[in-house]
Image: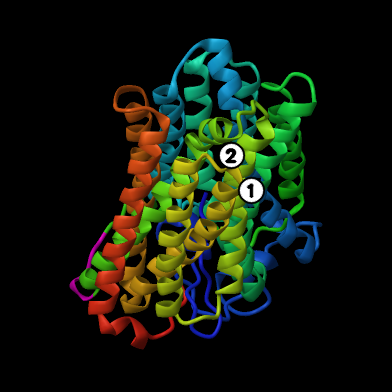
Amino acid sequence: MQPAPQDHHGVITLASGTGSAGGSERPAGKRPGGRGRHASAERRGGVAGVLPQRAAFYLLASIVVSFLAGSSAPTPLYAVYQAEWGFGPVTTTLVFGVYAIAVLVALLTMGRLSDHLGRRPVLLGSLAAQVAAMVVFATAHGVPELMVARVIQGLSTGAALGAVGAGMLDIDRLRGTVANSFAPGVGTAAGSLVSAFLVQYLPAPTHLVYLVLAAVMALQALGVVLMRETVTPERGALGSMVPDVRLPGTVRRAVLTAVPMLIAVWALAGFYASLSPALVRTLSHSTSAVYGGLALSVLAGVGAATTLLLRSAPARGVMFTGIATTVAGVAVTLVSVQNGSLALFFAGSVIAGIGFGGGFQGGIRTVMPLTAAHERSGVLSLLYVVSYLGMGLPSVIAGYLVVHAGGLMVTAREYGTAVIVLALLALIGLLTDRRGGRSRPVIV
């Protein structure tokens, strides 16, 4: 789940960086129809496509939605898997955590591949892998198959998001920045909620949602075949797969401020994706899959809307908003857990969703304006390493604690308290670092 901030009048754009852990650093204005290698790619007859550019843009946005929907689709199904195969919360969080690690690996190694091979080859390969992952999900008979499917899914998602983000920028820089921010949260929210309704009201709950997603992705692959390529392939593909993670001295203070917030919001997202269905079932005294999918949908959907609404706000203000709403939202959910109130839990989830969108966007934008052009790739890679580790590892730890250290409710309270502490550490760093308000606008 990765709503990326964007830049318009001083707001950071992470469209390429969203998937590339580094992105392709192209000067503004080098778009199809102008000068540069993007324009030369379109003039080559061998890469000309028949799909209009506007349609290609929406196709790319839909790929982000479908990939992130696929990543959240298993969330409402965990209870079904647990009942059929007899595993516990630790296994649930491991299935989720392995996906986060796979995405991280792909972001670091394959995120820039489309700059060298072209957008279409990377997207076609990723879509083929996603279809394969959906087939493995649909035919799974145990946890090992779930693990395999999650690894394939994570690797292909991490590889594709860079190509998608860069491709939308190639077509329309301004709309591309907005779409890269908004589409991931929409996909995560939609995948969880649609999956929940399919599980609750239609037959074959562990098969149908994956087969529907596989069909959608196959159609998207056909659309990619009809697209025109927007870059000219160039040498250096293997070299681009070497992770480039750097931390220049000029950004170390800002990173120390941002890292606690990035860990906080992504740990919160990981908790919602892995354990919120069980928590909602306990609070609601209901086995409805819709409740289980709704919690993640609320968090991700509100987070996506927040990144869109705050895209032109000053970075420092976005960071303060993210911190305040994360603390408030998690505090409300903790009260709801204590009082057993489902309505209060969802109210807290809405507030925490604002914190997720604002905290992630604000954290990235606190750091990136301080980097030089040649430093952005490595710094952004580092921030994504932190984010995905924050999403995967705490959720696995939480699964262990649910079983061995007090149960679901106690773990939820401890987890929420840790998120609040991390957000307050970010607040202390922000208050003692006055450079954030004077950051220059940068497009990554």
Please state the horizontal and vertical placement of residue 79, each as a whole percent of the image.
57, 23
> Which residue is pictured at 68% across the width and 56% down the height?
61
Whether residue 173 can be seen here: yes
Segment tinted magenta in the rendering: 246-250
**Image position of 423 with respect to 398: above or below:** below
Dot 1: few (<14), some (14–19), or many (≥20) neighbours within 10 Å?
Answer: many
229 relative to 1, above or below = below
274 vs 325, nearest the viewer: 325
Q: Which residue is mark 2?
A: 72
For the residues labelled 2 and 1, say whether their Cβ atoms are less than 8 Å apart: yes
Which residue appears at 52% of the width and 18% of the height?
145
Q: Which residue is mark 1?
A: 189
Would you say 36 lies left or right of 384 here? right
Q: Would you say 263 lies left or right of 207 here?
A: left
Residue placed farthest to the bottom in the image? 438
| Total numbered labels | 2
Label 2: element kind: helix
What is the chief secondary structure element of the magenta stretch?
Answer: loop
Q: Residue at x 71, y 30 (%)?
A: 209
What whole-number distance in Å separates the C-alpha atoms at marks 2 and 1? 8 Å
Q: Residue flagged by tag 1: what amino acid is it? A: Ala
Upstream in the sequence, badge 2 or badge 1? Answer: 2
Judge by depth and name the residue closer to the eye, 426 or 283. Answer: 283
